[in-house]
Image: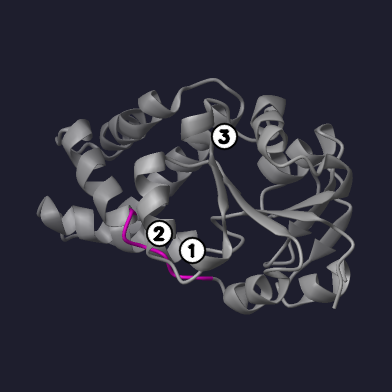
Amino acid sequence: MSFKYKLVLFDADGTLFDFDASEKEAFKKTCEHFEIYQNVDLLHKQYEIINRAIWRDFELNKISSTELRVERFRRFFSSAELHLNAADFSEAYLINLSKGNKLIEGAESVVKLLYGKCELALVTNGLADVQIPRFGESVLAKYFDHIFISDLIGHAKPHPEFFKQVFLRLPFKNSAIIVGDNLLSDIKGGNDFRIDTCWFNQNKCTNKSGIIPTYEISDLSELVDLLS
């Protein structure tokens, strides 16, 4: 089987990795470490709102990854009226998160089919000390020779500098596609850099963003036929 792209860029969390499950487990374990046992699910929902907002600020270059690590917990503790040290909580949380590498259904089989037929690269807006051990321990590690992490590049998707750094190492811009679940970071980033895009819309959400992907799928198994 041959494929029409020489390079496939995969977003990591929410596309190949079930970040929601890993993140929730990391939050729960960290709460237990700090002896928080009551209303953990409610607290997590509260944290999720704050965390999503601060990551969006990061994608828009309004906050650095260094600031993000602790600031999200400062805001969360203030909102939840918890009297804990945000830096200590962040450190423990990131250690727990770095151990979570549960995959989204179909991720390994799709990557395995593409492996050796086109170049594969992971492109993630993440923290290096979390993403590197997660990927290294994952069954997907053997399929990827290229990993690009915003924390190391110094710019987050959708910033064009992120994509510029990718294509300095992988000169396949004229035959590349990015697959991701985030319309802003993945799809807008790819569109702005003039490469094809595939929105992984697992929950079949309505797209009201005005950001239009080249392709849209709701199951990773659809990707092989789409690319072949």
Asked if residue 142 is among those painted magenta in the image, a careful observer would answer: no
Residue at numbered disc 2: 136
Residue at numbered disc 3: 56
Residue at numbered disc 1: 141
Relative placement, left or right, of 79 versus 128 is left
- Between disc 3 and disc 1, whose residue precedes? 3
- Between disc 2 and disc 3, whose residue precedes? 3
Q: Residues within 10 Å of mark 3 (few under 14, many from 20)?
A: some
Relative placement, left or right, of 9 versus 198 is left
Is residue 213 depicted above or below 155 in this figure? below
Disc 1 and disc 2 in contact, CB within 8 angstroms = yes
Q: Amino acid at mark 3?
A: Arg
**3 vs 1, front mark:** 1
Q: Amino acid at mark 2?
A: Gly
Q: Amino acid at mark 1?
A: Ala
Marks 1 and 2 sit apart, C-alpha to C-alpha, by 6 Å
Disc 2 and disc 3 in contact, CB within 8 angstroms = no
The percent coordinates of residue 207 (x first, y second) are: 80, 52
Range shown magenta: 98-103
Tell which of 18 and 166 is nearer to you.
Answer: 166
Is residue 228 depicted above or below 213 in this figure? below
Q: Residues within 10 Å of mark 2 (few under 14, many from 20)?
A: few
